[in-house]
Image (cartoon, rainbow, N blue to C red):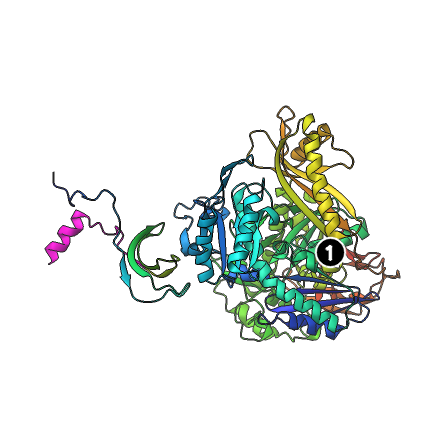
């Protein structure tokens, strides 16, 4: 049976947080980062201050987050 | 005496001097809310005024529209989302809606955004014992974030703080040390020291908002009134329309967040006392909605909590008011199935009903009343507005229905009355009452016009139209006592050996109230209790004067339980949960001037009422001020006064009572 993703090698899973330039409009700290989060409303791509955790932006992400179902992957490959 | 009701659009000021009532209306100013209040007060005159009673919906409007200051919420670590979680109750209208779900996070526009809700490492257990000491270093770290975010206020609600406030007091000191003494702080153990952390938390959050909204305003108002020559007492009305001195109100301002709507009920109770009528259903019919509330055994029906919006609970005594979207401005429409529908949409005051001539094109209940001949187009709102019958006619003509014109108009009026009648009946039945035991009090500008028409649907004893029905709610601010109250929670089984502990809880609260009030008053004790195993309380079990006798408390609990729910379980032990003390200080109130008796007045003229049936009917038209006490008017008739019109329907009689009230009954 083929897995659609490799078995994780890390002991703990974590989301990569990419630092971005700019100051937090709430606390002024220059510690903004972009990453994907899962909330009660689904997956979101957020830009948050790492000092106070205020959300600077919050955009809906794909419904399954980073996971791409096999069927969708095949369909996408067939289109291309 | 002066009373002021600050609404979102208008500020109404009412003055009673030597029995004469004067009213003025000033446009509200959210940027400087004290200015219109002072302008209205100066217009009516402050010389010799002894009390200035104030109600406002400023706090409510700020919460509903989320125009709120930046406030933080501190709670025990791991519990910061209790403000989102609420009580996990679904809205009543969504009970069977599978798609409804509670929003979490900032999507639901929480009062405090999630990044300003911070967990503090500490833990007290439910019996008050220490599980984890407050970690000052961790708390300072969290407060450092709040300082950088420049919050204006902080609400603190730690788990089990109602049992022992030690950690909340410690945290308040840290807040003031880190953020400065100017930051408003509310701690739950002082604001609302009651069990159940969600209601305690939401009450504390609203309290700190109200501190920020009302503190500057109240000081400005007090200074402005003093400069204008006012030397009396400035009082604020609370959610049950009882009064408290303004500086006392600022100690726990969550109590005044929803002042205003309850004033009409308070006014009704005051009139009922004067008339010897102790069971009333109060109906305030305005332009958009009808507020229905009960007075039972002479007192407004008061609850121990209320919701500002769905599941936003406030632990404050409040008059229970139920609203239905039916009023003078309710829009008449045709449903998909061809029925005439009235409300819940309203034309409001702008553009208003079509007959106002301000651009409204949709027919309303006021348009129907005008076309039926009930309203006088030249004397509406004291002659301030000329009503246009042609526009009302065009609005009803525009309805897409095969119904005849007279049916559209007649049905609209009767359906509006029936909608209100349905809500009135629901309110009485929900509280276990029988409509036949109640008198319906009809006030608000449209109440005397619509409610007598619903008399045959309601099965109430009678309809009473009070004096000054258009200003009756505002007069409630001048019909109330000063009431100081306090409450505490302590889970105590009602066994004989518990008496000293219960006595100690009451005595501690009474000492505090006496200190705050600084004057004598009537003390009333009550408690909220439950049967062992229940998770909800039966509120307002009255405690008799004198030393605590637990057997009497248990019996009072079972009596209250049976009265509210119809059952009695004397074999199940009772547990006391919350204890309440009220210190009631009598205040100067408005008196209803006796109406001079006289003979039956002859109607000054006869008018034609249309659309009641197939043919127009002739009706007598009276001026209310010309009717003496004892005068009897047989329907159909119309009785006019400055801000209201009373309809006496065919088959009804109206009699003028000793205080000028109109008593309308079905003819025998």
Q: Return the x and y of residue B654 as percentages of the image width and height.
A: 77, 57
According to the picture, the residue beneath numbered tag 1 turns out to be B267
- Residue B16 appears in which quarter of the rendering? bottom right
Please provide percent x and percent y for residue B419.
Answer: 59, 54
Q: B228 or B645, which is in the foreground?
A: B228
| Element type where label 1 sits in the image | helix
Chain part drawn in magenta: A59-80
- Front one among B583 and B87: B583
Q: Within the image, what quadrant is residue B290 found in? A: bottom right
- Report if residue A60 lies within the magenta region: yes
Q: Quadrant of residue B562?
A: top right
x 67%, y 70%: residue: B37
Q: Is residue B38 magenta?
A: no
Quadrant for the N terminus of chain B in the image:
bottom right
Q: Can I make out residue B122 in this image?
A: yes
Q: Residue at x 46, y 53 (%)?
A: B140
Circle 1 residues within 10 Å: few <14, some 14–19, many ≥20: many
In the image shown, does B555 or B51 lie closer to the viewer?
B51
Q: Is any atom of residue B336 visible in this view? A: no
Q: Nearer the viewer, residue A44 or B169?
A: B169
Dot 1 falls on which chain?
B
Query: What is the count of numbered marks?
Result: 1
Q: Is B226 on the left-hand or right-hand side of B539?
A: right
């Amino acid at each position: 049976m083929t897995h659609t993703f490799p078995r994780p090698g890390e002991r703990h899973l974590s989301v990569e947080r990419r630092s971005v330039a700019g100051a937090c409009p709430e606390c002024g700290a220059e510690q903004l980062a972009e990453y994907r989060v899962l909330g009660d409303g689904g997956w979101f791509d957020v830009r948050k201050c790492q000092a106070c955790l205020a959300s600077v932006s919050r955009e809906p992400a794909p419904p399954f987050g980073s996971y791409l179902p096999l069927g969708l992957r095949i369909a996408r490959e067939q289109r291309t | 005496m002066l009373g002021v009701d600050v609404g979102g659009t208008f500020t109404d000021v009412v003055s009673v001097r030597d029995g004469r009532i004067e009213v003025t209306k000033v446009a509200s100013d959210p940027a400087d809310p004290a200015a219109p209040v002072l302008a209205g007060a100066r217009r009516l005159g402050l010389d010799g005024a002894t009390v200035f009673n104030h109600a406002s919906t400023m706090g409510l409007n700020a919460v509903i529209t989320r125009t709120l200051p930046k406030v933080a919420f501190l709670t025990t670590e791991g519990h910061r989302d209790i403000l989102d979680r609420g009580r996990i109750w679904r809205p009543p209208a969504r009970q069977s809606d599978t798609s409804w779900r509670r929003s979490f996070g900032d999507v639901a526009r929480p009062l405090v955004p999630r990044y300003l809700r911070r967990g503090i490492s500490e833990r007290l257990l439910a019996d008050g014992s220490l599980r984890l000491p407050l970690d000052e270093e961790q708390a300072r770290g969290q407060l450092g974030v709040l300082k950088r975010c420049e919050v204006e206020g902080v609400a603190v609600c730690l788990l089990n703080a109602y049992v022992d406030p030690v950690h909340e007091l410690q945290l308040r000191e840290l807040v003031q040390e880190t953020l400065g003494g100017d930051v408003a702080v509310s701690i739950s153990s002082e604001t609302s020291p009651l069990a159940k952390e969600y209601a305690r938390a939401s009450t504390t959050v609203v309290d700190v908002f109200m501190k920020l909204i009302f503190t500057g305003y109240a000081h400005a108002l007090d200074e402005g009134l003093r400069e204008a020559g006012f030397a009396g007492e400035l009082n604020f009305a609370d959610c049950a329309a009882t009064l408290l001195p303004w500086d006392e109100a600022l100690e726990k301002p969550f109590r005044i967040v929803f002042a205003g709507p309850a004033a009409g009920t308070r006014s009704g109770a005051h009139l009922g006392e004067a008339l010897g009528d102790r069971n009333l259903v109060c109906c305030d019919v305005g332009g958009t909605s009808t507020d229905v509330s009960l007075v039972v055994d002479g007192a407004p029906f008061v609850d121990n909590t209320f919701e500002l919006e769905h599941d936003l609970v406030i632990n404050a005594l409040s008059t229970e008011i139920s609203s239905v979207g039916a009023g003078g401005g309710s829009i008449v429409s045709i449903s998909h199935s061809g029925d005439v529908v009235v409300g819940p949409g309203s034309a409001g005051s702008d553009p208003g009903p079509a007959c106002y001539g301000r651009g409204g094109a949709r027919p309303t209940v006021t348009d129907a009343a005008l076309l039926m001949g009930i309203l006088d187009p030249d004397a509406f709102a004291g002659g301030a507005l000329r009503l246009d019958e042609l526009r009302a006619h065009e609005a009803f003509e525009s309805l897409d229905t095969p119904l005849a014109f007279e049916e559209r108009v007649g049905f609209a009026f009767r359906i509006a009355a029936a909608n209100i009648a349905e809500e009135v009946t629901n309110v009485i039945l929900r509280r276990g009452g029988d409509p036949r035991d109640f008198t319906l009090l009809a006030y608000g500008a449209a109440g005397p016009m619509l409610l007598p028409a619903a008399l045959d649907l309601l099965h109430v004893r009678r309809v009473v139209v009070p004096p000054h029905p258009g200003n009756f709610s505002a007069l409630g601010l001048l019909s109330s006592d000063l009431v100081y109250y306090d409450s505490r929670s302590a889970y105590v089984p009602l066994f004989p050996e518990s008496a000293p502990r219960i006595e100690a809880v009451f005595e501690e609260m009474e000492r505090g109230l006496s200190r705050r009030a600084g004057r004598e008053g009537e003390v009333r004790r009550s408690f909220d209790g439950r049967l062992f195993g229940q998770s909800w309380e039966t509120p307002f079990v009255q405690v008799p004067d004198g030393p605590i006798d637990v057997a009497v408390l248990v019996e009072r609990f079972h009596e209250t339980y049976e009265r509210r729910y119809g059952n009695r379980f004397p074999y199940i032990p009772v547990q006391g949960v919350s204890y309440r003390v009220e210190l009631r200080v009598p205040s100067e109130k408005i008196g209803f001037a006796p109406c001079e008796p006289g003979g039956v007045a002859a109607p000054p003229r006869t008018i034609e009422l249309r659309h009641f049936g197939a043919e127009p009917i002739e009706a007598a038209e009276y001026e209310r001020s010309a009717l003496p006490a004892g005068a009897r008017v047989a329907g159909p008739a119309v009785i006019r006064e400055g801000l209201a019109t009373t309809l006496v329907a065919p088959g009804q009689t109206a009699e003028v009572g000793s205080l000028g009230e109109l008593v309308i009954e079905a003819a025998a």
